[in-house]
Image (cartoon, helix red, strand yellow):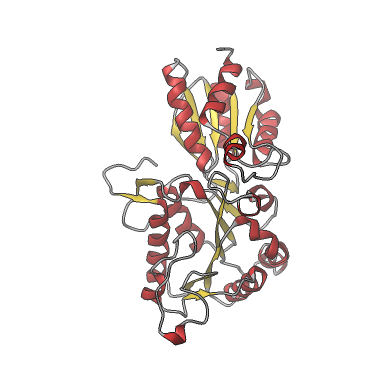
Amino acid sequence: MTVTNTRQIQYKDALIESLTQEMQRDPTVFVMGEDIAGGAGRAHLGITEAWGGPFGLTKGLIQQFGPSRVRDTPISEGGFLGTAIGAALTGFRPVIDLMYMDFVGVCFDQLISNAAKIRYMMGGQAKVPLTIFTRFGAGTGNAAQHSSIYYGILSHIPGLKVVVPSDPYTLKGLLLSAIRDDDPVIVCNDKKLIKMSGAVPDHPYTLPIGESRIPLEGQDLTLVGIGYTTQLCLEAAQTLQSLGVKPEVVDLLSLSPLDKETVLQSVRKTNRLVIVDEDTPRCGIATDIAAIVVDEAFDFLDAPIKRVTAPHTPVPYSKPLEDHYLPSSEKIVRITKELLNRL
């Protein structure tokens, strides 16, 4: 999935472009969320300017598609997610902008009791082609109630698909796949990636949900990243290469379904594993991957599995504490040196 000879655009622009192209292609696609279309109740004033919410991720869509397909909602996540589920059951493909991942708690019942279960409970006679894109992560000064990471919780729920892009290219491919999927898909976007630039083709393309990628091949150990932490793994890999270490980087991309085979194949080659996840460590994705590798590739391990995660605390607001809270490439290098006994 190496992309060359194409233009460079920001992550947020790749998201807007993805929505634009899919809404042009499929008239059943529409977008709902808070503050995405200039504020609810202003259409009668002739105001159609859209700032696209606090991150500008839907900016300009209402001018192209109008208020029937770009809908501002009340501050009632449970209400508009329930509305979207109903729309999906009747043939539409709603895309929900859930402003922060923390707000999953407000609409959790709609997710776990309806979106995740309806197709199964109806024996496949109904489908719920619903996409939710949301933001998560520390490092941007949004404090504890707007920085949480719940993709581990969401991945625990059968019936939900969960993907985490790591750059503008994977965002566009995964978001288009999510919208075209007949099951609920949650696209989790790390806020630290929103202004990242990368190579993105201008035409629509999809990336398969359930497959990871290897952006860097190596032989001495495996570094597993999720979203922004994949970028940290690649940064750490540059430092390690200067020390004579050749790491392999696995970019998970999809948490449910989880591509465990790519991780296992890499570990069987490198014999060492470091998992980097910004989520807290208890019952998280890093812990799950470690358990899978111990269960299915234990005989290939030459050293204990190491995890680089956030501590088991809420995200602090203090900037020095927030910096200390986050995984970093320096922490990855330090853990790797310990693992390889290169102190």
Residue 46 rendering spot, x and y as whole percentages: 40, 84
Is 50 drawn above or below residue 276 in the view shown?
below
Q: Nearer the viewer, residue 136 or 81?
A: 136
For the C terminus, give its image quadrant. Answer: top right
Is 306 drawn above or below residue 91 in the view shown?
above
| Residue at (64% x, 56% y) in the render | 102
**How many numbered dots are placed on residues in this image?**
0
For the N terminus, give its image quadrant. Answer: top left
| Residue at (62% x, 46% y) in the render | 317
Q: Nearer the viewer, residue 316 or 40?
A: 316
Is 155 drawn above or below residue 93 in the view shown?
above
Res. 104 image quadrant: bottom right
| Residue at (41% x, 80% y) in the render | 47
Residue 4 rendering spot, x and y as whole percentages: 30, 42
Q: Residue furthest left?
A: 5
Left/right placement of residue 148 relative to residue 39 reads: right
Q: Nearer the viewer, residue 226 or 100?
A: 100
Is 249 drawn above or below residue 81 in the view shown?
above
Q: Nearer the viewer, residue 151 or 75?
A: 75
| Residue at (44% x, 65% y) in the render | 58
Residue 16 rendering spot, x and y as whole percentages: 40, 61
Residue 159 rendering spot, x and y as whole percentages: 66, 58
Res. 259 image quadrant: top right
